[in-house]
Amino acid sequence: MASFAPPGYPLLTERLVQPKIQRRVVVTALNIVTALGVDLESSWDGLVAGRSGIRKISLFDTSKHETRIAGEVPGEFDDYARKHCSRRLSNQMGRAIKMGYVCAKEAVTRAGVDFDAYDRVRCAAIFGAADTGHSSIHDGRYWIMKTMPHGASAWISQEYQLEGPNLTISAACASSAYAIAYGYDLIAADRADVVIAGGASSIINPEHLGGFNELGALSVANDRPERASRPFSMGRDGFVIGEGAGVVVLESEESAASRGATIYGEVAGYALTSEAYNIMAPRPGGVGMAKTMRMALTNTGVAKDQVDYINAHGSSTPLGDKYETVAIKDVFGQRAYGIPVSSVKSMIGHTAGACGAVEAAVTLMSLHTGILTPTVNHTPDPDLDLDYVPNTARRHETTVALSNSFAFGGCNATLVLRKYTGASCA
């Protein structure tokens, strides 16, 4: 068949295949801010303990709303933020931007990166955001800066004088997974040495609560907030809004080794696809979800029998959880029944644009510690019959894990994460 590609330009079939990666991408720090805590340790301890951070909303009057619960970040966040953020800077940031900024600064401190030792053009800040979340309930001063979609990446880039890419990717609740994927590409292709990648979200406000209720997407189990988010369970009635931030510091293996950095794990690769079907709903049977996971395995050269754990999107919606389960079975066949699958949204809610990064960080902690976080509030559903790590954390040595993010607008992402061994695993 004749080719219409210009001379020297790869054929379409070649361009659709991820190029052979030369540089390995490792994670040298991570941090999260969630409804269970303002930093990694407090959030991780709560997740492992199986605690729920879902409570009645305190940020505004919800009496006229159908849903009155959410996963609010603890009130001590503002005090915690002061050690990273001056009063003047804090006043110019929206709530989500501040969470992302503080989360990133703490992650960089933990990584011990000295940017003076790097070419700053090869250092980047890439964030994901579905929405700034700035609302009528917030202080109206500095409106422009508080509603900048790329506010978190811009402030972080300025803080460390990073001269590489500074941008925010918007792909609904897959946004920060996309950010990690782009950060991976920059390093793998030798266009960056260090990338601060993550996401932040704070959409607990009247506009988003009313909007999602209008779509019938939210749980209305207001009487028992801590049990409202119940992924993969009988009686699940929609997701619960959460807020927070997640950040990972990505480095080339050479960079991390040269400074003796602690390595929490490796980003082996990813796949991004579009459902191209419906603005809200996935394709019936989880066809798009399955395609994304298959492509992620193909792109990274990881065999199906190497996957030890799946951190599910698991949003507690009737169709989403059903189709993700079907997709996992489609990809892994009989072996699906032996792969633990769990959802942290059961404890912290759905953190929208932040969830890809928050959940990637949690997955990396599972790889690092050998502990799987549970899916709490689990009541068996006869149509959903995988191992959802019900209700209690579990010790389980994991070498390769998938972290799924499946979003409104048909934006799908699967990150392939693995334990760092110091030698090629491909």
Image: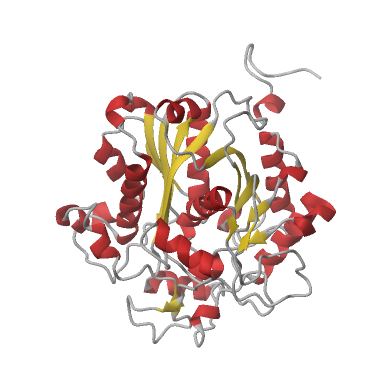
Residue 33 appears in the picture as rendered: no
Quadrant of the drawing holding the N terminus: top right
Q: Position of residue 180 (x, y in %)?
A: 50, 42
Residue 140 is left or right of residue 239, and the answer is left
**The one of 152 and 421 positioned closer to us in this rendering:** 421
**The one of 259 and 3 positioned closer to us in this rendering:** 259
Q: Position of residue 346 (x, y in %)?
A: 56, 69
Q: Position of residue 229 (x, y in %)?
A: 56, 74
Residue 203 is left or right of residue 373, and the answer is left
Q: Quadrant of residue 203?
A: bottom left
Q: Position of residue 317 (x, y in %)?
A: 62, 70
Q: Residue at x 35, y 52 (%)?
A: 103
Q: Residue furthest top?
A: 7
**The one of 355 and 131 positioned closer to us in this rendering:** 355
Q: Residue at x 55, y 72 (%)?
A: 215
Please determine whether, in this image, residue 168 is positioned above or below residue 257: below
Please determine whether, in this image, residue 325 is positioned above or below residue 56: above
Q: Residue at x 27, y 37 (%)?
A: 160
Q: Residue furthest right?
A: 334
